[in-house]
Amino acid sequence: MPGPVIVGITGASGALMARAMVDELLRRDTPTAVVCSNAARMVWQEELGASFNETLVEWQEHPAFVHYALNDLRAPIASGSYPAAGMALVPASMNSIASLANGISNNLLLRAADVCLKERRPLTLVPRETPLHSIHLENMLTLSRMGAVILPPDPAFYLNPQSVDDVVRYVVGKVLVSLGIDQELPTDLQYGERVI
């Protein structure tokens, strides 16, 4: 892998997915860079009952982890010459999606995603909004046409998930496949020919 996987955490609902994504990358000792929006920090507190900074302290104990401040436009991940392996926005707010679709990259999270688009590196967006109106759909179509993978965190009900954690693990597995980190869903999610 050429460089870290970048995880952008935006202010949409879905902090549990973001936490699970970073935890899984670090469990594998995959170099991981995280950028978190201010709105995401508020959602983190509301949804997980802990501050983002508390989680950050835990992650920073891992040697493969690095965190960049949202406004640190001098961070290496802001440059196309930095060999990032790809990026996932987990979750991806409609505001971030709209900004990317219109070439607006006024913070590090958006700039890193924009770099992935321009350098043709893997970029996966996990949008968290419903219902979607036409502008949301047009923005996602624009990004899909530019090479981004749009990966809504839809539960695979046919797999009979038994908990929210089952759904989250499935979504994280799909993101890892979309970034090219895995070729197929992890074996611990498979039962015979079916994924559980």
Image (cartoon, rainbow, N blue to C red):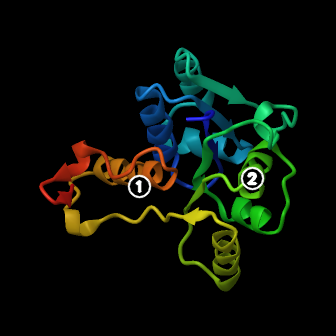
Q: Which is more N-terminal, label 1 or label 2?
A: 2
- Position of residue 15 in the picture relative to residue 53 (left or right): left
For label 2, the SS is loop
- Position of residue 113 in the picture relative to residue 184 (left or right): right
Quarter of the image where the C terminus is located: bottom left
Quarter of the image where the N terminus is located: top right
The percent coordinates of residue 56 (x first, y second) are 59, 25
The residue that appears at 21% across and 63% down in the rendered structure is: 159
- Position of residue 102 in the picture relative to residue 149 (left or right): right
The percent coordinates of residue 145 (x first, y second) are 67, 74
User: Disc 1 designates what residue?
Assistant: 174
The percent coordinates of residue 57 (x first, y second) are 58, 19
The residue that appears at 30% across and 65% down in the rendered structure is: 156
The residue that appears at 48% across and 56% down in the rendered structure is: 178
Count of all numbered marks drawn on residues in the image: 2
Amino acid type assigned to the residue bearing label 2 in the image:
Glu
The residue that appears at 73% across and 42% down in the rendered structure is: 38
Is 107 drawn above or below residue 155 in the view shown?
Answer: above
Between 149 and 135, the residue placed more toward the observer is: 149
Measured Cα–Cα span from mark 2 to mark 1: 22 Å
User: Disc 2 designates what residue?
Assistant: 119
Amino acid type assigned to the residue bearing label 1 in the image:
Lys
The percent coordinates of residue 105 (x first, y second) are 84, 54
Between 9 and 143, the residue placed more toward the observer is: 143
Q: Residue furthest left?
A: 192
Between 28 and 17, the residue placed more toward the observer is: 28
- Position of residue 1 in the picture relative to residue 28 (left or right): right
